[in-house]
Amino acid sequence: MIKRYGAPVSTENSLTEEPSELLRELVAHLRQNRTQLREEWVGRISETRLLTAMTKDEIFAEATSVYDSYVEALETETFEALQAYARNLSERIIPRGVETHEVVGIVLLLRDVLARSLFAKHQTDFKKLNRILGAYEPAANRIANTVAVGFVQERERVIRQQQEAIRELSTPVLQVRERLLILPIIGVIDPQRARQLTEQLLRGIRTNRAKVVVIDITGVAAMDVTVANHLVQTVEASRLLGATVIVTGLSPEIAQTLVTIGVDLGKMNTVGDLQGGIEQAERLLGYKVVALQESR
Amino acid sequence: MEVPILKQGDFLIATFQAALSDADLNQLRRGLVAQVVKFRSLGVIVDVTAMDVMDSFASRTLREIAHMIRLRGAETVIVGIQPEVAFAMVQLGLTLEDVATALDLEEGLAYLIQKFKSVD
């Protein structure tokens, strides 16, 4: 079956070529002129000052593989391989500070370079040029799309991963003695972090078989009513697991917030500073710290 | 499914299974409250490790069990509440106030033994 494709052109022999045939012809052309087109592209890249984070040799090497995957994607009309390559490339160049506009820019440059070479090749046969471009443009746009989406996805993945890492780092649950955990909280607590903190603490109580937990919030300047409520709930949930919670280092602002929401102080065990909290925890656990006489 | 009540020295131990109907809970309450005096037990441990959901009825029943057993002259410890369950309960306001809780069976036993050591 013969399909119409691209811009409508006169009927003489335009219907005799299928788009896939046109693409094959196109691919052959791109293979033939690989060296020249690639060099032209690399030239355009450095001209427009894209990928300044990479050296010239690196750009050339990457350009070669991008070019080949590009041609391959045109030939096979499957984009999975290109997608995988784009992800792989992004993984390598994102840490070096390559921006989205640069990646999109170079792919669009390649599209322009190839389109120009098609113009140059078929400038005498306008109808043919029209048909070839009709086959080339949708494929090229899709390639540009695939690469850009791949890059952005990779970037988002990296950002998500880092966010997770920061969150985990920021709320360590530490065992200081047998059955005594401390949870130093530093920085701003939003509801999401508060929830994660609770989860980590409750799991920590389970795995370390903790009896007493000291939550130190010296590093928290203020918290809103939601988070303060959450803190109280965390204390109660810990009690359900059989652990006593001591909260230390409440700032005047946080004390104000807790009073405003009307916390039942019978449920909250608070001590002024972390040292006092640990001392009280040791008393609860039956430890007694005695200074050695010889030590100074 | 009925909850078995085991006698272990001076204590009674009841271990919850995953899915308990309200009728099972009521039966457990009757059983525990009757047996605690029959065996002259000092304490009761209710192990809820297997429960990954705790609804308001279950948590109210637990509290009632604890209070009734105190009126019958013994102590109750709830053990093995899962971290997720604990937080969900607190968010629903089911905090089991004035009921003793412990991490697991071992902790619960240690708590009761500690508690009654001074009595002896």
Image: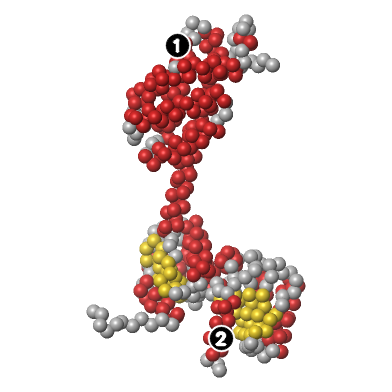
| Above or below, comparing residue B40 to residue B50 in the picture | below
Residue A89 percent location from the top left of the image = 44, 36
Disc 1 designates what residue? A120
Which color scheme does this rendered protein use? secondary structure
Q: Nearer the viewer, residue A244 or A272?
A: A244
Residue type, mark 2 in image: Ile
Pointer 2: residues within 10 angstroms few (<14), some, or many (20+)?
some
For image coordinates 52% across by 19% down, the residue present is: A27
| Above or below, comparing residue A200 to residue B67 in the picture | above
Q: Is residue A115 visible?
A: no
Quadrant in the picture for the N terminus of chain A? top right
For image coordinates 42% across by 32% down, the residue present is: A103
Residue A141 percent location from the top left of the image = 52, 25
Q: How far, Cα to Cα, is label 2 from label 1?
A: 94 Å
Q: Nearer the viewer, residue A124 or B65?
A: A124
Q: Is residue A281 visible?
A: yes
Quarter occupied by residue A274: bottom left
Disc 2 designates what residue? B113
For image coordinates 62% across by 70% down, the residue present is: B49
Residue A238 percent location from the top left of the image = 52, 70
User: What is the chain letter for disc 2?
Assistant: B
